[in-house]
Image: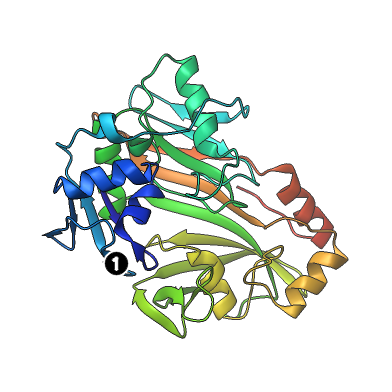
Amino acid sequence: MEWVADYPQRLDAFLGARDFSRAAAQRLIRAGAVTVNGDVIKKPAHPVADGDVVVLNEDAEVTNVAETSVQPVDLRLSVLFEDAACLVINKPAGFAVHPAAAEKDTTILHGVAHLFAERSLPFSPGFILVHRLDKETTGCLLIAKDEASYMALQRQFKNRTVEKTYLAIVAGVPDPPAATVDAPVGRNLTDRTRMSVLRTGVSREARTTYRTLSATTEAALLRCDLHTGRTHQIRVHLRAIGYPILGDTTYGSTQADRLAKQYGIESLCLHAWRLRFELPAGGTVINVEAPLPTAFQNALNNVGLYFMA
């Protein structure tokens, strides 16, 4: 298993945020099963920096140490696609995809545990979530059913062969109407909960292509294609070029806040609309689309925008 850190923390805390208990993480580290940037690290308190590559030896006894409190919860998740290797769910707004170390809230992972229980599938939290979506973002979320499928799908994300297309309603009308934002994204130095293209520690390459699909005099609907997958990437890039997403309380602006209030928009207008990837077995290319959630469609109607797939 391989991850890239996106902000500084202890190594055992980093693993703990990926559904290992702190005690289990410490046992793995002391056993020499974890490397950071290629070096075996045996100190649980070792500092992990933004951009560090953390790898857990796949031969380690993960199932014995991945203690988890994730219990099945029926979130009535809509399954958009499913085969023997994976499934794609339509993620609703308001749920983090993964439990945070210090939080006990119900997450998408709890809902996925319920789907696995319904199908009598073994549930191993460390090999489930192939990628992430922000808590308030809706749409396509890819789930692996087993470790081999997880690794195969992760390789596609790492090699950037997965096509991820989002829809966003923004304040203002982009000029030019279509462009690629190529700006490295990193953790903000003054607010560690935010990402930024300026005043960051370690920044990583980030590219987003947008195209205007519909516009009024004060707002626009954009199609956004991700070429990289950084934390909050679309939200940060659109804010950086002056067109923040409506309903974004973290990366908004005075204009965006005014429009959201004017049109009764209370949720983030960002939807993971389409996901294109290869099935782990056979290489068949799959295109999955998530229908617009009611809140997003209402926002389009209220602002005077339209969407034609």
* Residue 58 horizontal/vertical position (percent): 18, 39
* 102 left or right of 162 in image: right
**Disc 1 residue type?**
Pro
**Quadrant placement of the N terminus:** top left
* Residue 60 horizontal/vertical position (percent): 17, 37
Answer few, some or many: residues within 10 Å of disc 1's Cα (few below 14, many 20 plus, some between 14 and 19). some
What residue sits right under mark 1 in the picture?
A: 47
**Residue at figure coordinates x 53%, y 71% from the top left:** 194
The residue sitting at the bottom extreme is 199
* 109 left or right of 305 in image: left
* Residue 72 horizontal/vertical position (percent): 53, 25
**Residue at figure coordinates x 63%, y 75% from the top left:** 243
Q: Is residue 5 visible?
A: no
Q: Is residue 24 visible?
A: yes
- Dot 1: what SS? strand
**Vertical position of residue 190 compared to residue 295: above or below:** below
* Residue 75 horizontal/vertical position (percent): 62, 29
**Vertical position of residue 201 compared to residue 305: above or below:** below
**Vertical position of residue 237 compared to residue 38: above or below:** below
Determine which quarter of the picture holds residue 84.
top left
